[in-house]
Amino acid sequence: MTTEILQPDDAGLSRAREILRDGGLVAFPTETVYGLGGDAANDHAVARIFDAKGRPRFNPLIAHVASLDAARKLARFDHRAERIANAFWPGPLTLVLPLAEGARLSPLVTAGLDTVAIRVPAHPVARALLTEFGAALAAPSANPSGRVSPTRAEHVLSGLSGRIAAVIDGGPCKVGVESTILGLYGPRPVLLRPGGLPVEAIEDLLGTRLDNMAAAERPNAPGQLSSHYAPRARVRLNVRSPEPGEFWLGFGPEAAGAELNLSPAADLVEAAANLFHYLREADARISPDATIAVSPIPDQGLGRAINDRLRRAAAPRPGAG
Ligand code: TXA
Ligand code: MG
């Protein structure tokens, strides 16, 4: 199959809808990363998502919808969930909620769990596509499983060209790291993944600190396999002065000699937006047995999400000796 590159205009969106209605896959921009969309109610389409990514079927997907109203048809919202959704949707937040009875979703989306992950994205192209399609789109990040998430259409093509019907080119993603995932299925809200919405914003709204769920307790340890977001090269963290031969991925003014600097001004929002693009860039510039040395990143705001992704990029690789 040849992957079509669609423009984010009326013609592109109606072509995307046609492909999706036929059970095909279309990658599309969101404010966090590009998603690989398929009709969330169509078993075949959802199965194709897992195949295209090489993703294990036990790892559930996020259902994307255009509005809170549409989300209420898929999940049960209690008072707490309503408050959080009203405050942060549309935006880079995914809520994991009890599945609604009669929800029009393939069981493959939830991997058979009785909870469902839902997000209302803010990106205008994602919103236009969801409105045009008129139903939920299952969409994981549009990268082969275990690799770095895509923040540009060309990243999507480098990983999935020929495996998906189309990509809508909406330019670079502004946030650059995946959504924050908050579990709202138990007595206490649980942070399942730090991401594009700073954890502190949720904590301020709730007036409490969030429990960070221990990896061992996570349902199916979703997307939380130790090695993830991996470039080919090795990654070494919290490096203030790199060894000779290492590729320095810097942060802040202290890293003036770095080959690439996530944010010379030490701005975490800018660093998040650059993270995945620079990891790919570093990987392309060095030999596969070289090392990317990364400066320390403050563990607050978007820094929490950046450090989470970097720790996974640095984690031991399965089958990597
Ligand atoms: O920003 C994002 O969230 C992007 C864009 C495309 O929306 N999507 C994304 O999807 O990052 P993905 O599949 O790469 O990550 C979704 C995460 C996975 O770790 C998955 O295990 C978790 O959400 N998840 C999905 N359903 C879940 C559930 N019912 N309970 C717990 N975790 C769940
Ligand atoms: Mg992913």
Image (cartoon, grey):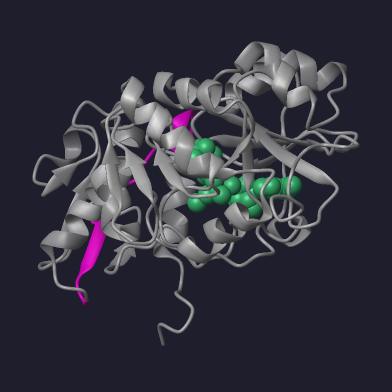
Vertical order, 79 against 149 (above or below): above
211 shown above or below 51: above
Q: Position of residue 312 (x, y in %)?
A: 47, 59
Compared to residue 314, the image places residue 45 above or below, namely above
Nearest the viewer among 31 and 253 is 31
Q: Residue 270: where, in percent of width, then height? A: 29, 28
Query: Which quarter of the rendered picture does the N terminus lie within?
Result: bottom left
Asked whether 132 falls inside the magenta stretch, the response is no
- Predominant secondary structure, magenta span: loop
Res 181 seen here: yes
Residue drawn 59% across and 58% down?
224
Q: Camera-side residue: 165 or 92? A: 165
Residue 191 in the image: state x and y as whole percent: 68, 39
In the image, taking residue 75 as reference, residue 296 lies left or right, namely: left
Residue at coordinates 80% horizontally, 33% vertically from top-left? 184
Which stretch is magenta? 289-303
Residue 176 image point, x, y percent: 37, 35
Q: Quadrant of residue 208?
A: top right
Whether residue 292 is in magenta: the answer is yes
Q: Nearer the viewer, residue 242 or 205?
A: 205
Query: As drawn, is 152 to the left or to the right of 183?
Result: left
- The answer, for residue 304, to whether it is visible in the render is no
Name which residue lies at 26% across and 31% down.
171
Q: Nearer the viewer, residue 53 or 278?
A: 53
- The reply, left or right, for residue 138 in relation to residue 249 is right
- In the rendered structure, the answer to whether residue 234 lies left or right of residue 209 reads left
